[in-house]
Amino acid sequence: MESPFAHLPAIVHHTGFESSGGATRVARLIMDGLTGHGVATRLTCELAEAGEAELVAPEAFGAGLAPGELAHLHCSGDWPGLLGSIDEGRKTVITLHDCELFTGGCPYPLECEHLEDGCADPCPRAFPDSIETRKLKHRLLTRLDPLLAAPSRWLARLAKKHLHRPVAIIPNGIPWPERPRIKQEARRQLGILPAARVAVFAAHGGTAAAYKSGGDWRSIWQGVKARVPEALGFAVGGDTAGREGDLVIWPYVERERLALLLASADVLLYPTRADNHSLIILEAMAQGLAVVAYDVGGVPEQVAHGETGVLVTPCRSGDFVDAASALLADPGRCRDMGREAFSSGQRRFDVGRMVADYVKLYEQQAGIGRAGE
């Protein structure tokens, strides 16, 4: 039987990193879904951490495209160089994983008062030539005329406003298990006591992750621990390992190890200050885990307040501690929210749905339709 995607052109994905980061994970998941149906795909990146992917500088990307290949851009350390390298008329799709495509350099402008005015010079966050950089990206986008996608309605609205272009909404998806792992079995493998109340902080960069309030993790944990004495915490994603009382610090770990930890936990504590459509929230939901997070960006499109987790007014760490402590101390509520998180995520955030949505975007950009349509 012919593949339902056989009509697609070859697709080249481009990211900043070979293996780390949410944008690269999404790119690789899409590639896996396409290659499983016989579509030719390849990945180029700007930093090859393992030395296995095709290393391509942003300004050289376009020259490496073969005739007929469709470009799918995910992130770059030099958006002007990357966009400028692609010939006008090349079929291109761009996924906005953050705000950088329409700012003077910052991934998330937070409450920057200059965003609406076209940035400031000098930039208060020290991004060089922010006004001209922003204008240049806009001109290059107009010339290239790509199709844009964003994983969250929140980011799509911002991008439409500042780029004056339509943006498709394609929520992120991950491989979803048939059922979550058994919590007690996961705890047995990790040596965690059955009676512990386990909370996990996780973000790339760990306690140094500024947008994820990494610098506040310890103080939040201390507040939770004071209210829930039987609590055991894990802080995951940095460069070091250690233990500070009942707070266990893990560096960046492989996905299988992280899934095991999430399966053993009772709640994910995610005090992000800015976010699009977080993969760690999806990973937690896929293991039947309730989430406590700040109500920012695309997070409320993932976490249903009072049903699959708890949303807290942004940057009010005291309220975050109160909400996290109350949930962690209530095993029944954690369990019920975790079950609902798993089932709702299974319906909405499975990787197969994400790949199918991108196939429709590729078809639109390539000007082709499926046989029989």
Image: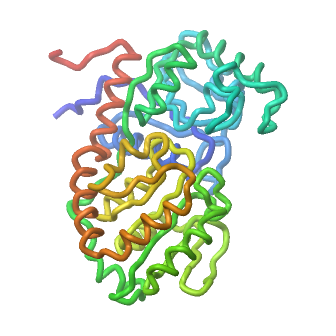
Give x and y (percent) for residue 349.
31, 46
Q: Nearer the viewer, residue 255 or 139?
A: 139
For image coordinates 36% across by 31% down, the residue present is: 358
Q: Nearer the viewer, residue 305 or 83?
A: 305
Task: Work out whether residue 223 can be spotted.
Answer: yes
The answer to which image quadrant residue 152 occupies is top left
Q: Is residue 327 above or below residue 279?
A: below
Is 9 situated left or right of 287 in this image? right
Task: Work out whether residue 60 can be spotted.
Answer: no
Location of the N terminus by quadrant is: top left
Is 239 situated left or right of 268 in this image? right
Q: How is the image coloured?
A: rainbow
For image coordinates 37% across by 23% down, the residue present is: 361
Give x and y (percent) for residue 167.
44, 22
Is 146 situated left or right of 343 in this image? right
The answer to which image quadrant residue 190 occupies is bottom left
Is 95 situated left or right of 357 in this image? right
For image coordinates 47% across by 79% down, the residue present is: 227
The answer to which image quadrant residue 261 occupies is bottom left
For image coordinates 68% across by 36% down, the residue present is: 106
Q: Is residue 336 above or below residue 163?
A: below
Q: Is residue 257 above or below residue 106?
A: below
Give x and y (percent) for residue 203.
55, 59
Give x and y (percent) for residue 331.
29, 76
Count of numbered marks = 0
Location of the C terminus by quadrant is: top left
